[in-house]
Amino acid sequence: MTVTVPHTVLPPTGTQRLLAAAGPGLDEHERTYGALPAIGPGIIDELGLAGVDGRGGAGFPLARKLAVVAAQSHRTRGRRAPIVIGNAAEGEPASRKDAVLLERAPHLVLDGIVVAALAVGAAEAVVATSDRLAAHVHRAIDERTTRAARGASAPDPVAIDVRPLPHTSFVSGEAGALASAVAGGRGLPEDRVVRLAERGPSGRPTLVSNVETLAQAALVARYGARWARGIGSETAPGTRLVTVSDVTDPSHAVVLETPGGAPLGELLGASRLDVAEPRRTRAVLVGGWGGTWVPTAALDATLDVEGLAPWGAAPGAGVLAVLDDRACPIVVTARIAAALAEASAGRCGPCVNGLPRIAEVLAVLASGRPAGDLVGEVRRVAALVDGRGACHHPDGVARMVRSAMGVFRDDVQAHLAGRCLHAGGAR
């Protein structure tokens, strides 16, 4: 693939790539990045070389997703045209990155949607997001439409719509749930036998990709894989958006754009949050509420798959939720488990029975009133729900509570003895 960059526009330098523009408008966007070049047939290979992975949680390589949808589109020979869905549901309570991206760089997301749609042969695309953020996308689309109507630029080759979601919950961003919502369904996860990429709603091959992933695709389409890999690490090239937040108050959060593979401790320090001060940090929930608790001993680990593997964690949606020394980790974990049980779609046994039971046992443990083998019961139920849900929501809960039982072992033992190491509990 040959990438043509307008000679008057230089690629962004430093760590601000996704958020490099001075403002969200189309003029600021094109002054920073230039116009989107023609997308050639080699774009999927270029994205693969760039190492663009999914930023919504699963980390699946974008190029592989695109290749499956493109192949399915070719097999159907246009009888069922593909559709591209930009996922900005962001139901994860501790994440703010997609909101920041749509507020500050909506045109980069729209460019990425155009890139993905052209790569798979789609003529239609949708950005699915909350009512509040939908306004930013509408405004950006209107700018592009108005400019094209004046003849100042060519219209987008893809029809892009915005689908405000009736509600955004923890499971609303799951790919099947999002595809269902876009098609007018209930927007709940489904236990699918056939992949969305092969046959989604109305039988159409469907690409669901996080908006940050799509924005990264827009950068690669402009500047190429070599430029994309000019920052970050070998296994985590480029930059990524990271939300650092207070686990007891997710509204207290900072979004950073950072080179891939940055150490956790460095990211906490860059956030300048009080809870992230080294002397106060007790543990970090990595990847989001359905992620993994890691102790302060893990703060030298890098935010990538390989760096986090020894701790049983993964980057997920780029969330670092910090627990400081003023909160009881057992109380906090019990509250998160209860919220996740309440947030389930309630469509499978693990969500209907397993998650409420886990939340119930953790609530008893948090209360400090011992009643049998509470830890054993948590582990037993977590094993029962793992891998058996209609989506991966139960897996995330099981992972989170298992890690809590290990990282907070001393606190667990204190609660089993009827006392709390953090008098007063969570803030």
Image (tube, rainbow, N blue to C red):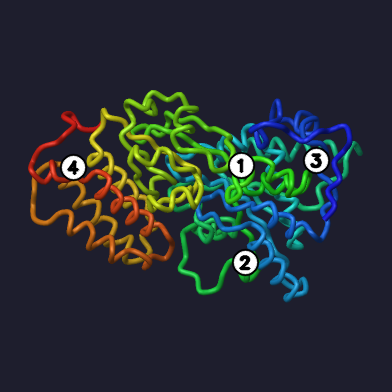
Q: CA distance from mark 3 to mark 2?
A: 29 Å
> Which image quadrant is residue 298 in?
top left
Q: Amino acid at mark 4?
A: Asp
Q: Which residue is mark 4?
A: 410
Q: Nearer the viewer, mark 3 or mark 4?
A: 4
Number of labels in the image equals 4
Q: Are marks 3 and 4 in contact (CB under 8 Å)?
A: no
Q: Amino acid at mark 1?
A: Gly
- Circle on res. 383: none
| SS state under label 3 | helix
Q: Earlier in the sequence, mark 1 or mark 3?
A: 3
Q: Position of residue 288 (x, y in %)?
A: 42, 45
Q: Earlier in the sequence, mark 1 or mark 2?
A: 2
Q: Nearer the viewer, mark 2 or mark 4?
A: 4
Q: Which residue is mark 3?
A: 145
Which residue is rendered at x = 73% and y = 30% of the image?
Answer: 25
- Circle on res. 197: 2
Q: Callout 1: 10 Å neighbours few (<14), some, many (20+)?
A: some
Q: Earlier in the sequence, mark 1 or mark 4?
A: 1
Q: Amino acid at mark 2?
A: Ala
Residue 215 shows in this picture: yes
Q: Are marks 1 and 3 in contact (CB under 8 Å)?
A: no
